[in-house]
Amino acid sequence: MTILCGFGMPGVMSSWGFAALHAVAREVFGDYAVISADTIEDLRQFVQNREKKHALLVSQFPEAKLSELIMRMNVPFLLFLENPVDAVSYLARSTDQQDLALVRAVSASLACLEPFATAPAALVMRRNDVRGTGGIDWLLQRIDQHYGIGLTVGQMTSALQHIGLAVSGEARPLAPPKLEEAAAAIIAGYMPPLGNGAELDPSLREAAEKILLPLELGRSEKPARSVSWPAWTFFSGDRPGDCLTDETIDLTGGARCLVYGPYFHLPAGCWDVRLLFDVEEDCYGQVFSIEVHSSDLLARLRVCPQGVGSFEAVIPVEIVEPRSAIEVRVLMDGGAIEGRLSRWSADWRRAA
């Protein structure tokens, strides 16, 4: 059984790249199965029940075990990447939405794909790197060479016509276009790679920049930046489902959850989360529990701020499964008759 593997984050690059893989598979295999697998179990079930000899495996959110298997097998695969802000802009246009679910989706994909970015068996195609190079025929040749297929001229021409190569009135192929022209012709919701989120709501653009740009893959030349989760991306424990839009959190009342969320994703590994908030009214003796959850409880810290002023807590956290969203909870362990918190934020840095 032959399986061609391709992975990519949501966006124009992976939409065109996956279409290119389908075009290659049609020419080489004729009849083939498509495995949209994110887990080892998905792949195992397909292999057990397979009805076709050849398959194309594509995924945007592979679990850690599936990524480990692909790299352990050392089979050639493709990885399609682009600027994360452009990815959010593409999703916003193609889904007609402007909310944090788009940032959560891109954060999940970046977190899951990170191990592939430096894998020896990967051919990384980053949109901003390849868009100014040769035409799509050059890109398809690179794909062909990486897999070691050896497409004929006829197969190459036929495949190109499925990924943006126009044909003249005499049914003769015209000159192969560059990536952006080809992508604009075949991808609904296409947007040029502006990198600035100009079409996004200002708050969504801010979230994409603070949460996603520090996770951009394959940019080792950029200095490491902390991943910042703004206060407004969290939810109010007093108003479940509502974001933290108020400047302050009133502590008056019984023991309860004050803050929770925001359900973004981080790559596997050891991290330090730095939680900052101001105590505006004295809550002397009040004990708070700070918990970090994913599929399991990852960390817990109990703190007791003294007096008023700024407070900081640093919690070491190990992320094991990047497909699982992360929830931070701040709980008040006992009741209070006064006290207010403000200027809430959470910053993540990879542990030294």
Image: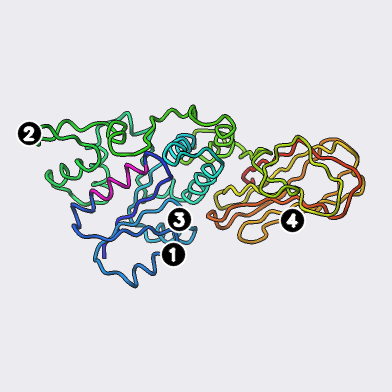
Residue 288 percent location from the top left of the image = 82, 51
Residue underneath mark 3: 62
CA gap, disc 3 to disc 1? 9 Å
Residue underneath mark 4: 300
Question: Residue 196 magenta-drawn?
Answer: no
Question: In what quadrant of the picture does the N terminus appear?
Answer: bottom left
Q: Is residue 245 left or right of residue 122?
A: right
**On the image, which quarter does residue 179 sit in?**
top left
Under mark 3, the amino acid is Pro
CA gap, disc 2 to disc 1? 48 Å
Asked which secondary structure carries label 2, the reply is loop
* Label annotation for residue 40: 1
- Label 1 packing within 10 angstroms: few (<14), some (14-19), many (20+): some
Residue mark closest to the camera, 2 vs 4: 2
CA gap, disc 2 to disc 3? 44 Å
CA gap, disc 4 to disc 3? 28 Å
Residue underneath mark 2: 170
Q: Is residue 147 above or below residue 226?
A: below
CA gap, disc 2 to disc 4? 69 Å
Marked residue nearer the N-terminal end (2 or 1): 1
Marked residue nearer the N-terminal end (3 or 1): 1
* Residue drawn at (58%, 39%) of the image: 211
* Label annotation for residue 349: none
* Residue drawn at (25%, 41%) of the image: 163
Magenta portion: prevailing SS class:
helix
Under mark 2, the amino acid is Glu
Marked residue nearer the N-terminal end (2 or 3): 3
